Amino acid sequence: MFMAVRPLLRGVVFDMDGTLPESDLDLAGMYRRAGVTSDILVEMQSMTPDRQREVAQIIEEAEEVGRQSLRLMPGALDVATWLGRQNIRTALVTRNCEKSVAALKELWRGPPLDPLITRDDFPAKPDPAAFHAIVDAWGFTPEECVMVGDSLANDVEFG
């Protein structure tokens, strides 16, 4: 009898907002203030430089509110600690900025999230470039890794 062998889980890539930490980041309000109805980072690419600066300021203000209210999601450290004990690598990929990742690092007391990737490091999710870079750096296959996030449009597509 032939039994399919399932790949071993060797790596977990986490999203940030709504997955590891929670905050008062108001994404809907940010989109409303920016006058954007689809992906804000994608829409910014087709804006004039002046409009890009305006929208970037709106994003920065919203993310600052999120940073000031950042707190770890209940159980996030427990899950990460368990993964670490199983020798499962963990990383973080976010559409957030470096300042927000730095704020998370201040709270994080779990096993290392390595690498920590922001929207400034790779094309933003759902573009899978960061996922492939992580898997390659770890020396794993994509089938040995999973993405954990809260957004169907960005996280599931990314993974």
Image (spheres, rainbow, N blue to C red):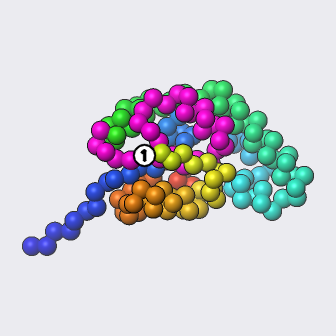
Mark 1, secondary structure of its residue? strand
State the residue at coordinates (72%, 53%): 40
Closer to the camera in the image, 136 or 142? 136
Query: Is 110 inside the magenta-drawn segment?
Result: yes
State the residue at coordinates (67%, 51%): 120
Spot occupied by residue 148 in the image (x, y as percentages of width and height): 45, 48
State the residue at coordinates (51%, 47%): 115
Q: Farthest residue toward the left? A: 1
Q: Quick check: 97 above or below 129? A: above
Closer to the camera in the image, 35 or 46? 46
Label 1 environment density (alpha carbons within 10 Å; few <14, some 14–19, many ≥20): many
Query: Is 72 inside the magenta-drawn segment?
Result: no
* Residue 129 seen in this snapshot: yes
The magenta segment is 85-113
Q: Report whether 32 appears left or right of 125.
A: right
State the residue at coordinates (37%, 32%): 78
